[in-house]
Every structure is written in structure tokens, then in C-alpha cells.
């Protein structure tokens, strides 16, 4: 029957379309996963040396012997390479920002309306006759300098410096000082002019799209790199494809070697191989596609395969307590807001059950002498002072570590592909962090109505996230609603703007400058009837860029949805921002889920640990009816978990949702080790410490197999698993007996 069930599961796995999954956002809520996958392509030219903080400290030549080493020339070459990519991938390329020329034309016509009311006092100071004369005199002086052409300044577009008054709203139009700015096509160019960023999208493999972009570049001096979620998924799937046979097989080989040396018999090892196959088949069949997050659980199951065979010293007569604790070790994850872990917690329970049942069925056919406990047997002597010192020390250190550890969200998973991670870091240094993008959906009956909704959402973003914004890609940042237009018109009329423009024209003439060079500014500023309304924006040069933000309504409505994106630096306080109309702007994206998870995980860590302790202690109490034993084992378990937290801190490894299963499995190991040691004290029998250590070494072997991979997530999981498995039997031997003696004395005194 067991063989038939195992073969059926293996056949079901073979028929499944996808055993390996490419998901790396399985712990991110569905509504916060990106609806549009972007690949970020970085073009670089010249050598750009950086200090330890990532700041550029020296810029080398563009190419040896190449005269085009100055910033403007390098920028032209980068933009030419970007144009070649645009032509080669017309359906995949999309602008990140409004095209520079169109944005500049819009600003020239409406800059006065776009100045926020809070800056109107400064605006009034800049349009006084004296301020106008001073500004034009400064322009004349700069024009007479022989170095003016090298600065790239265009004073004719903003002779009075009014764009500096736009504040955070300018992020939707132009670059903030010292940051990247938009190119003529709508890509982003770095502040030093030596790096350019493009956004590509496509339905096919991202790597193929990147290679097509690379092939379009003829300039050999330009280096191209790429990053983004599509590429991360591809690299993740490749890592799982490589690791799926290697990691479990390596863990099995190490664990079986340890068990074979300890048991000195072949039959028990073959039993473990057969039973492990049942457990792995069950886990893979019920858990779903195996991806970067879930592969460590397969390896961990290999590590616990020796439990129930090596450990012939049972906690209860029936021998079900330890297998039950192991099987239910991940049940606290049912309380977590991660559907992936909820599903795998149930799959783990059934897989562990299948493994232990297989061990019982196969073991029943073997001679009893092969299953006898071997190795070191200790007569434990309770020593409460040592138990108190060890327990208090680990609990205190664990509390310190829990507060000191870096908490990392589920979307910030680091991959073992160094080139991909370095490119991601380069994008973060020069432009923005690709993992810190927040999106907003603005809905309306038609494009103009949706743009009106985007106005309120963009204002909410600027108001709520202004200090954290790196870049704002929002159609609503370009326009103003009707009520705001009327209010600002009154304010501008009070400043007598048309008359001030006459003063500006006179100052230009008096300085001997051509008035025609400033014609667009003079015309746009003097005409207060030309407003930055939604109607004007859709009838002007920015219509195409605005329309490129339109999405299909996921709710199935007939209206139009405009997407806005905020590229942020800091942490978010919530997933919604208040709007001026009393509504709320809902924020979506992995960054939102990450920040919420980071804020909550530290507090919930105790909840998950407490749930695991309660389950384990309940099982021990039901098996032994000994409350002191259950409490002593629970303290041993939490001390083991605290030891893992201390280990992560010492190794400078972050704690996050991907490591929760490892932490809970270590707690289960500590619970079992403490329960066995206490039971030996209760029975007055020696503890089969050799068998306990042998079972622990099998789990350490599984952890070592994960550490030997090149994926940082697997290495962290393996470190936690191996460290906890090594610590648990030590605490079981040295701390649990003293705790048990102390608690038994206290419980008896209370009864008396």
C-alpha cells in the first residue's frame, strides 16, 4: 500500500505542467504584486569610480584615444544608443518621464500656474522690476563668458528662475537639482551625464528582449546592463532548476553518511531513503511548484528523516509525540498573512506524516536489533542553577537580537546572480531603487475624467511622500483642476503678471538681448487664459505620454484607468494617502507590502513562536500528562529559537518571512530534545544522547547542503537550520533537566 501511494504521487508529479516555479514574490500579497513588469536597462560610458557610499569620485575617459570624453558628448552618444534601442524595440520601449522638449514647452506656457500657492510670496519677489533687472543682468553676464556653452544652461526658457519654485511637483516634469533628468525621448540621464536608463516591457522572455537591445547598440564604448523583476524571475527559475536535484541530493548524501556511520548498518539507511522519497513526493505534490522560497523545505524534510528511526527513546509509550511535534511545526504559519506558507504548512504536516508512517511500516519488517539505540547513553543530573543561567542567557540574547536584527520584507529577496544584483544597485545609486516603486490607479469614465482623478492622486503623493520622492511619473502632476485654476488665476492677477511681463520684455531689450529668444516665455506667462487644465493637456504635445499611462481596468469596468508611479527612498507609513477632496489615494506595489511586513513582523515574531510553543507543549502534555515536562521543553525550544536569532545577528543576516519556517523547525527540535531529556529524568533511565546527537547531525547536514549553494536566501535558511539543530540537543542535555526539576518542585509545592 505504501509503495503504491508513493508511486502514485511520483506519477502525479511527472504529469504536472510545472514542477519548478519562477515566483520570487510568493510572500507578497496578490494586490501588491506589479501588474506591469519592467526591465530596466542601464547604458554607461566612461569609467565611473565610486567611494564606499556609492558616490562618484572620479570619471575617466569615455574611451582611450577618444576625444568625445566631455559630458555633453558622452550624453549625445548615450542618447544615440538609446534611440537605436527605441527603433529596434518599438513595442517594448516605454518612456519613464515626459519627453524633455514637450515638458519644457508645457512649462514655458504654464509655469506660473504650476507654482504652488505656498510659494507665491517668493514668486512676487521674483517679478518685481528690480528683481527682473537683476535677473537679466545676470543672464547677460553669463552669456558673455567663454565657458557658457559648456554649462548647457538655457536661460531663455526660464529667465526669472521660476522653475525653482515648483518644489516637489517638478518631479513630474523636470529633474530635481543633482538628480537624473529626462532626455528628449523620455528616458532618464544621470546627473553626471555618463549613465542613461531605459524601461522595456514585453510579453516574451526578458533575457531575449535584453539581448535584442544589446544587439542594437553599435557604439563599443557603451556598456549595457539590465535588471528588473522579469529578469529576477528568470534567474530564480534557473537557480531552482539547478538546485532542485543538487540541494536535496546533497542533503540526503550527507545525512545518510552521518546515519550510516552512526548506525553501522545498511538496512536502516535504506529505510530512510524509501521513507524520505514518500515524504518528498507528498510535499512536492501538495505544496505546488517548487520555487526559490520553498526549495529549502524539501531539504529540511530530508534532515528530519532520521527522526523516528534513530530515536528509539520515545517520550510517550506510543511514540507519536515527537513525530506529531515535527509534523505540526509549521502550523503557526497558518496565522501569518502569507498564503504560500499557509499552503506549505499543511503540505509539510502531511509530508511528515507520510514519512513517519513509512518508517513505521518499513521498520516493522526489520529485525528489532537493527533499530536498537546505539552510542552514548548519559545519566542526566538536574542542575537548576546552570539551567537558569543558560535559559536566561539565551532568552536575553534572543530578545536583544530580535530588536537589533535587520528585518527585510518579502519583496527584497537577494539573488545569487551578482551581475543582476550589481545592476540593481547601479540603478538605485544613479536613478532610483527598482524595488521602491509605488503605483496608484486613477479611474474615470474617459481619458479626461481619469486625468482629473489623477490630479488629486498626484497632489496626494506630492503632499504625503514629498520628502521621500526620487522621481514621480504621474500625468496628474502636469495639470490642475478647475477650482485650483480659478484660485491661482486670482492670485496671479493680484501680482499683475501681464504688466510684469512687459517689464521683463523691456529689461531684455535694454540689455541688448534678442526678445525673440524669450518669446515663448513672454507669451505663455502673459496669457493667463492659457491654463494647465486636463483639456489643454490632452489637446497638447503631452497627450501621447499621458495616454501611455492608460491601463486595462482589472475590475472589468468600461472606464479608463491611468497609472501613476512614485519612485521613493524612505519607508511608507501606510498604504493610503489623504486627498484634498476627502478621499484616500490607495498605494500599491511590493514596496508597500515590504514596509508593512517590516513594521509588523518584529511584533508578530513572538506570536508565531508562542503558537509553536503552545502546540508542542500541548502535545507533550497530552502524551505525558506532566505539565512541568511540557513547560521545561517549551523553554528549551524558545531558547533554541533565541540562539538562532543571535546567530543571524552574528552573521549579519537579515530576518524576514522566508526564514520563519527555519525558526519554527528549530523550535520543534528544541521541544523534542527537551522532552526526551526530561522524560529520561522522570523515568530514572539514561538518555540515549548518541541517538539524539545523530538525529541532530542529520538536520545539520541538511543545513550545510543549503549553505553550500550560492543563493543568499538558501544560505541564510541553512545557517539557521544547522545552527539551531546543533544547539537544540545541547540545551536539551544541559538546560532541560534542571528546568524540569525546578518546575516539578514548583508545581508540587502549589498542589501541596
Image (tube, grey):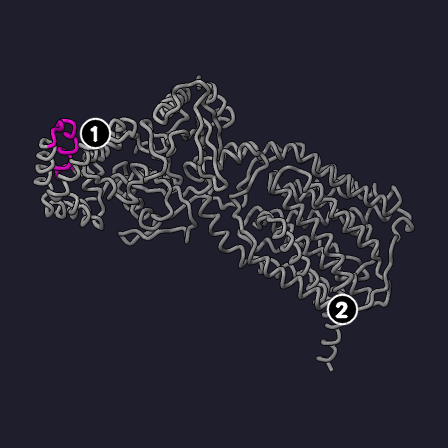
Residue 146: name its quadrant.
top left
Is 631 positioned to the left or the right of 511 in the image?
right
Residue 209 image point, x, y percent: 48, 24
Specify start and end residues of the magenta stretch as a single range.
Answer: 511-530
Is 453 positioned to the left or the right of 207 in the image?
left
Dot 1: element: helix
Marked residue nearer the N-terminal end (2 or 1): 1
Query: Does the magenta run of residues contain 363?
Result: no
Which residue shows up at 29% across the image and 40% down it? 170
Is 378 positioned to the left or the right of 419 in the image?
right
Residue 748 image point, x, y percent: 74, 78
Relative to 338, residue 245 above or below:
above
Q: Which of the two discs, 2 and 1, sits closer to the camera?
A: 1
Query: Does the magenta run of residues contain 525?
Result: yes
Q: Quadrant of the N terminus?
A: top right
Which residue shows up at 76% across the image and 57% down it? 729
Looking at the image, can residue 176 be seen? yes
Residue 577 image point, x, y percent: 35, 51
Determine which residue is flagged by label 1: 143
Residue 113: name its quadrant.
top left
Q: Do the residues under discs 2 and 1 have CB atoms within 8 angstroms? A: no
Relative to 39, residue 620 above or below:
below
Dot label at residue 738: 2
Q: Quadrant of the C terminus?
A: bottom right
Residue 426 image point, x, y percent: 47, 35
Q: Is disc 2 surrounded by few (<14), some (14 to 19) or many (20+) residues within 10 Å?
A: many
Amino acid at each position: 500500500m505504501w509503495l503504491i501511494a508513493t508511486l502514485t504521487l511520483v506519477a502525479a508529479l511527472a504529469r504536472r505542467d510545472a514542477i519548478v516555479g519562477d515566483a520570487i514574490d510568493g510572500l507578497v500579497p496578490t494586490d501588491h504584486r506589479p501588474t506591469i513588469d519592467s526591465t530596466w536597462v542601464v547604458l554607461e560610458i566612461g569609467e565611473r569610480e565610486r567611494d564606499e557610499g556609492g558616490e562618484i569620485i572620479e570619471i575617466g575617459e569615455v574611451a582611450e584615444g577618444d576625444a568625445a570624453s566631455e559630458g555633453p558628448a558622452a550624453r549625445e552618444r548615450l542618447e544615440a544608443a538609446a534611440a537605436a534601442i527605441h527603433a529596434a524595440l518599438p513595442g517594448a520601449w516605454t518612456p519613464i518621464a515626459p519627453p524633455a522638449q514637450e515638458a519644457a514647452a508645457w512649462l514655458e506656457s504654464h509655469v506660473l500656474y504650476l507654482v504652488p500657492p505656498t510659494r507665491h510670496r517668493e514668486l512676487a519677489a521674483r517679478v518685481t522690476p528690480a528683481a527682473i533687472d537683476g535677473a537679466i543682468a545676470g543672464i547677460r553676464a553669463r552669456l558673455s563668458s567663454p565657458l557658457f556653452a559648456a554649462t548647457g544652461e538655457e536661460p531663455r526658457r526660464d529667465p526669472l528662475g521660476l522653475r525653482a519654485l515648483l518644489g516637489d511637483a517638478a518631479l513630474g516634469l523636470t529633474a530635481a537639482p543633482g538628480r537624473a533628468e529626462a532626455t528628449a525621448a523620455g528616458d532618464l540621464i544621470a546627473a553626471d551625464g555618463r549613465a542613461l536608463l531605459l524601461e522595456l516591457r514585453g510579453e516574451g522572455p526578458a533575457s531575449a528582449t535584453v539581448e535584442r537591445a544589446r544587439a542594437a547598440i553599435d557604439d563599443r564604448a557603451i556598456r549595457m546592463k539590465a535588471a528588473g523583476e522579469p529578469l529576477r524571475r528568470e534567474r530564480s527559475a534557473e537557480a531552482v532548476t539547478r538546485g532542485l536535484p543538487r540541494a536535496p541530493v546533497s542533503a540526503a548524501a550527507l545525512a545518510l553518511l552521518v546515519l550510516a556511520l552512526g548506525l553501522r548498518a545498511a538496512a536502516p539507511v535504506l529505510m530512510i531513503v524509501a521513507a524520505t522519497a514518500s515524504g518528498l513526493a507528498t510535499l512536492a505534490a501538495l505544496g505546488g511548484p517548487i520555487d526559490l522560497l520553498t526549495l529549502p523545505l524539501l531539504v529540511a524534510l530530508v534532515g528530519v528523516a532520521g527522526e523516528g528511526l534513530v530515536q528509539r527513546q520515545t517520550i510517550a509509550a506510543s511514540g507519536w509525540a515527537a513525530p506529531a511535534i515535527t509534523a505540526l511545526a509549521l502550523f503557526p504559519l497558518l496565522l501569518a498573512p502569507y498564503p504560500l506558507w499557509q499552503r506549505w504548512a499543511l503540505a509539510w504536516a502531511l509530508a511528515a506524516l507520510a514519512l513517519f508512517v513509512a518508517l513505521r511500516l518499513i521498520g516493522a519488517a526489520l529485525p528489532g536489533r537493527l533499530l536498537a539505540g546505539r552510542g552514548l547513553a548519559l545519566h542526566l543530573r538536574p542542575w537548576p542553577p546552570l539551567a537558569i543561567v543558560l535559559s536566561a542567557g539565551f532568552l536575553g540574547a534572543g530578545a536583544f537580537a530580535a530588536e537589533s536584527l535587520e528585518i527585510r520584507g518579502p519583496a527584497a529577496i537577494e539573488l545569487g546572480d551578482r551581475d543582476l544584483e550589481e545592476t540593481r544597485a547601479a540603478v538605485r545609486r544613479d536613478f532610483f531603487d527598482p524595488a521602491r516603486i509605488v503605483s496608484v490607479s486613477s479611474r474615470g469614465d474617459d481619458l479626461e475624467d481619469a486625468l482629473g482623478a489623477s490630479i488629486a492622486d498626484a497632489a496626494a503623493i506630492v503632499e504625503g511622500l514629498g520628502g521621500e520622492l526620487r522621481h514621480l511619473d504621474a500625468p496628474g502632476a502636469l495639470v490642475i483642476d478647475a477650482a485650483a485654476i480659478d484660485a491661482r488665476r486670482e492670485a496671479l492677477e493680484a501680482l499683475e503678471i501681464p504688466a510684469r511681463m512687459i517689464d521683463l520684455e523691456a529689461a531684455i531689450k535694454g540689455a541688448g538681448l534678442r526678445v525673440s529668444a524669450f518669446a515663448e516665455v513672454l507669451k505663455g506667462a502673459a496669457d493667463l487664459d492659457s491654463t494647465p487644465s486636463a483639456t489643454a493637456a490632452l489637446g497638447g504635445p503631452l497627450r501621447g505620454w499621458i495616454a501611455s499611462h492608460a491601463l486595462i481596468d482589472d475590475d472589468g469596468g468600461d472606464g479608463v484607468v491611468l497609472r501613476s508611479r512614485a519612485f521613493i527612498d524612505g519607508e511608507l507609513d501606510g498604504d493610503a494617502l489623504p486627498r484634498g477632496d476627502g478621499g484616500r489615494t490607495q498605494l500599491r506595489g511590493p514596496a508597500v507590502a515590504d514596509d508593512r511586513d517590516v513594521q509588523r513582523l518584529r511584533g508578530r515574531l513572538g506570536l508565531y513562536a508562542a503558537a509553536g510553543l503552545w502546540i508542542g507543549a500541548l502535545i507533550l502534555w497530552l502524551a505525558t500528562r506532566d505539565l512541568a515536562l511540557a513547560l521545561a521543553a517549551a523553554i528549551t525550544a524558545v531558547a533554541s529559537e533565541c540562539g538562532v536569532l543571535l546567530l543571524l545577528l552574528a552573521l549579519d543576516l537579515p530576518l524576514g518571512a522566508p526564514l520563519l519556517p527555519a525558526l519554527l523547525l528549530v523550535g520543534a527540535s528544541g521541544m523534542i530534545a527537551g522532552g526526551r531529556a526530561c522524560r529520561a529524568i522522570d523515568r530514572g533511565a539514561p538518555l540515549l544522547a548518541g541517538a539524539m546527537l545523530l538525529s541532530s547531525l542529520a538536520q545539520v547536514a541538511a543545513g550545510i547542503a543549503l549553505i553550500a549553494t550560492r543563493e543568499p536566501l538558501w544560505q541564510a535558511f541553512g545557517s539557521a537550520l544547522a545552527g539551531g539543530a546543533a544547539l537544540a540537543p545541547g540545551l536539551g542535555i544541559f538546560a532541560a533537566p534542571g528546568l524540569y526539576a525546578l518546575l516539578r518542585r514548583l508545581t508540587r509545592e502549589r498542589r501541596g
